[in-house]
Amino acid sequence: MYAPSELEKLVTVQSLRKKKANGEKFITVALYDAPMAAMAQKSGVETLLVGDSLGMTVLGYDSTVPVTMEQMIYHVEAVARGNKKSLIMGDMPFMTYATTEQALTNATRIMQAGAHMVKMEGGAWLADTVRILSDRGIPVCAHLGLTPQSVHKLGGYRVQGRDEEHAKQILEDALLLDEAGADLVVLECVPADLAKRITKSVSMPTIGIGAGRDCDAQVLVINDILGLTEQPPKFSKNFLVEAEDIPGALRKYAEDVKEGVFPGEEHIFQ
Ligand code: KIV
């Protein structure tokens, strides 16, 4: 049985790579405030993502597009105050990294708010930016597959990479970003086989959401874990129904991922 108290030191990019090398899964939760951050890191959640999903889960927008730097900074600061040892990733909002100069300025602000890493959505076009941030000491989490900031270009929240040509492109993007120095990559809503191929091909750990169970880690949004979402996505699960309280739900999520129980067949896309 996994014991949360084992998570004693600050989680780092290096400790996450070591877990990948040892075949040990880790857990990410997208959350937005100090008390949830405190409970998550005490419940064995290694990485906390202050996701721009907060636009939809907390602020009531119908996409992540309206989210601003000021909103992200406010929530990264809150999560940092609640956290002691987990690694905090801060999302870069829509169009705040369209150029390398913008990325450098805005990633600096997210890091200074308390994040240990920034996350950006995009493929090959982001490789130069990833290299420049990484060379200057800013760890980067890439995000491929369903990239919600591009929802209007994608035509909806749909599974990506189902045909071989698109799958090949996502795999090539992952390889390029890995080579450019990305430290992690989120794979969102891609077929399980594609996520498995990417996970085997790249040196950086992969974090899946709707991407099967072969990724190095899983991420879920706190609202989905706690059953707060009116129409929960297929890939999510309400862990509060099997637990007594919020820390219990977070521990159950962490245990189920580490034991290979979550995601189940019903949460996976083929
Ligand atoms: O913004 C977010 O919470 C995310 C996760 C769903 C991966 O990007």
Image: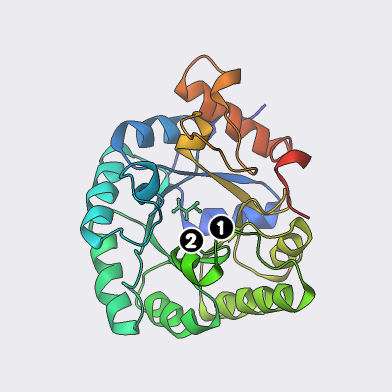
Q: Amino acid at mark 2?
A: Pro
**Alpha carbon distance from label 1 to label 2:** 7 Å
**Does the residue at mark 1 contact the one at mark 2 (Cβ under 8 Å)?**
yes
Residue 174: quarter of image: bottom right
Above/below status of 55 relative to 238: below
In this figure, which residue is indicated by the disc labeled 1? 157
- Residue 115 visible in the shown view: yes
Above/below status of 231 relative to 200: above
Q: Position of residue 170 (x, y in %)?
A: 65, 74
Q: Nearer the viewer, residue 241 or 204?
A: 241
> Disc 1 or 2, which lies upstream in sequence?
2
Please tell me how crowded label 1 is: few (under 14), some (14-19), or many (20+) other residues with Cα within 10 Å: few
- Judge left or right: residue 53 versus residue 20: left
Mark 1 vs mark 2: give the one in front.
1
Q: Amino acid at mark 1?
A: Tyr
Q: Secondary structure at mark 2?
A: helix
Residue 188: quarter of image: bottom right
Q: Is mark 2 within 8 Å of ligand 1?
A: yes
Q: Residue at x 33, y 44 (%)?
A: 60
Q: Residue at x 52, y 59 (%)?
A: 14
Q: Position of residue 175 (x, y in %)?
A: 64, 77
- Tag of residue 42: none
- Tag of residue 148: 2
Residue 115: quarter of image: bottom left
Q: Nearer the viewer, residue 189 or 245?
A: 189
Q: Residue at x 36, y 62 (%)?
A: 65
Q: Secondary structure at mark 1?
A: loop
Q: Position of residue 264 (x, y in %)?
A: 74, 38
